[in-house]
C-alpha cells in the first residue's frame, strides 16, 4: 500500500514540477519583457542580456575576419623592402587666373592652401604693377604673383619662372574645387600627363548642312554621352604646354583669343589634342562656382556666349588646318563611388575566384 501511495505522490510531484516549470517559464518571459521595457524606458539602467553579448562577439569576429581577409596586410612581413614613396610625394602648382575680384582671390588662396600636394600658388596678375603681395600671409604655402604689364587673356598660359612641378592646376578665381576632388584629379593627371584633365566637359559638333562647327553646353555632353574638351577654368595640364602655347600656337589663334578675350581654353584643348591625338580626361568631382551667379563680370554669362564659342571652334579648325579634337566617353571617378554590387561581373567575383 505504502508503495502505491508513494508512487501516486511522486507522480503528483512530477506534475507539480512540470506545472512549476511552465509557470516559471511564463514568469521568466514576463520578467524579460518587463526588463526590456525597463531598458527601453531608462537607458542608463541598461543590462545587456547575455545572448546579446554572444551575438556581438560573433558579429565582431565575422567582421574582423572579413576585414582581415580583404585587407591582406601582415605588418611583420616585407619590412625589409620599404615601398617607394618618392613618386607619391609629387606635388603640383596651382595657377589662379584672376581679374579685379580680390575677395574671390582671397577665398581661393585660403581654400587651396588647405589642400594636399600643392607646392605653390601662383597668381596671374595683369591689373597693375603692384599686386597685393600681403595676401601671401593668408597661406603657409608660397604665394607668388606673376605680374604682367600687358593684359591679355593669354597671360594665364605664359611659362612660369622657377616653377618646381610639372603638374599645373589651372583655375579661375571663382572656382573652388574640393580638396579631395582636387587630389583625385591630380592622381588622374599623373596617369595621363600629356593630356588635359579637368572637371568641366564640353563637346563640339558639326553644323548640319553648313561648313560650321558648334560648341555645345554640358547637357549635350550628358545627352550624347561623350565630350572632346575640358575647360581650363579648372583643369590639370603639364607645364610644358605653357611654353608650347606661348611660342608655337598659330599666331592667328593667339590673336583671336587676345582680341575677343575668349576661347583660350578651346585653343589650349586644340593645341594639346593636335600634338598628342588624345582626348581630354573628365574627372568626377565637386566644386563650387561663384561665377554662375555673377551677371556683371563673367564672360560665360553673355547671351551670345555659345555663338562666340562656336565661332572660335570653326575658326580654329581653319587655323589648325583640320579638326584635332578627339571625342571620348571615358570618365575617371574615385573608388569611393563604386560598390561591388553595382556591376554584374563584380557579383561573380565574390563567388568565382580567379
Ligand atoms: C597639328 O598637327 C599636325 C600633325 O601633327 C602638324 O603638322 C601641325 O603643325 C599641328 N598644328 C599645330 C598648330 O600645332
Image (cartoon, rainbow, N blue to C red):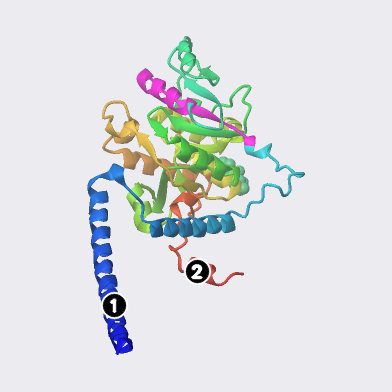
Question: Alpha carbon of mark 1 to alpha carbon of mark 2: how far?
Answer: 66 Å
Mark sitting earlier along the chain (1/2): 1
- Where does the C terminus fall, quadrant-wise? bottom right
Above/below status of 5 relative to 13? below
**Residue under circle 2?**
345
**Residue under circle 1?**
13
Residue 71 position, x and y percent, is 58, 53
Q: Examine the image and state in which quarter residue 26 appears.
A: bottom left
Residue at position x 37%, y 44% in the image: 310
As for residue 100 lying within the magenta part, the answer is: yes
Residue at position x 54%, y 21% in the image: 141
Q: Nearer the viewer, residue 64 or 217?
A: 64
Residue that sits furthest to the top in the current view? 130
Residue 183 position, x and y percent, is 51, 38
Give the residues drawn in magenta, as a range.
89-113
Mark identifier at residue 102: none
Amino acid at each position: 500500500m505504502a508503495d502505491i501511495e508513494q508512487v501516486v505522490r511522486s507522480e503528483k510531484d512530477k506534475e507539480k514540477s512540470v506545472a512549476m516549470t511552465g509557470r516559471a517559464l511564463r514568469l521568466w518571459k514576463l520578467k524579460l519583457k518587463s526588463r526590456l521595457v525597463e531598458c527601453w524606458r531608462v537607458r542608463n539602467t541598461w543590462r545587456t542580456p547575455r545572448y546579446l553579448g554572444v551575438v556581438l562577439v560573433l558579429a565582431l569576429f565575422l567582421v574582423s575576419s572579413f576585414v582581415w581577409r580583404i585587407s591582406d596586410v601582415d605588418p611583420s612581413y616585407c619590412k625589409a623592402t620599404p615601398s617607394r614613396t618618392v613618386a607619391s610625394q609629387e606635388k603640383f602648382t596651382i595657377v589662379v587666373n584672376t581679374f579685379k575680384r580680390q575677395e574671390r582671390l582671397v577665398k581661393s588662396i585660403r581654400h587651396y592652401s588647405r589642400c594636399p600636394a600643392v607646392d605653390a600658388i601662383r597668381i596671374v596678375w595683369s591689373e597693375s604693377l603692384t599686386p597685393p603681395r600681403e595676401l601671401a600671409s593668408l597661406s603657409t604655402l608660397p604665394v607668388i604673383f606673376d605680374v604682367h604689364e600687358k593684359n591679355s587673356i593669354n597671360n594665364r598660359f605664359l611659362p612660369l619662372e622657377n616653377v618646381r612641378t610639372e603638374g599645373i592646376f589651372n583655375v579661375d578665381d571663382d572656382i573652388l574645387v574640393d580638396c579631395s576632388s582636387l587630389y583625385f584629379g591630380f592622381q588622374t593627371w599623373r596617369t595621363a600627363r600629356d593630356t588635359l584633365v579637368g572637371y568641366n566637359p564640353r563637346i563640339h559638333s558639326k553644323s548640319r548642312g553648313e561648313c560650321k562647327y558648334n560648341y555645345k553646353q554640358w547637357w549635350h555632353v550628358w545627352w550624347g554621352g561623350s565630350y572632346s574638351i575640358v575647360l581650363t577654368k579648372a583643369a590639370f595640364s603639364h607645364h610644358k604646354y605653357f611654353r608650347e602655347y606661348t611660342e608655337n600656337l598659330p599666331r592667328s589663334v593667339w590673336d583671336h583669343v587676345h582680341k575677343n578675350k575668349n576661347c583660350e581654353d578651346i585653343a589650349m584643348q586644340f593645341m594639346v589634342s593636335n600634338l598628342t591625338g588624345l582626348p581630354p580626361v573628365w574627372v568626377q568631382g565637386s566644386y563650387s562656382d561663384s561665377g554662375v551667379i555673377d551677371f556683371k563680370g563673367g564672360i560665360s554669362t553673355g547671351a551670345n556666349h555659345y555663338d562666340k564659342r562656336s565661332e572660335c571652334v570653326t575658326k580654329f579648325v581653319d587655323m589648325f588646318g583640320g579638326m584635332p579634337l578627339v571625342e571620348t566617353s571615358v570618365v575617371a571617378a574615385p573608388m569611393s563611388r563604386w560598390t561591388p554590387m553595382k556591376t554584374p561581373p563584380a557579383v561573380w567575383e565574390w563567388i568565382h575566384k580567379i
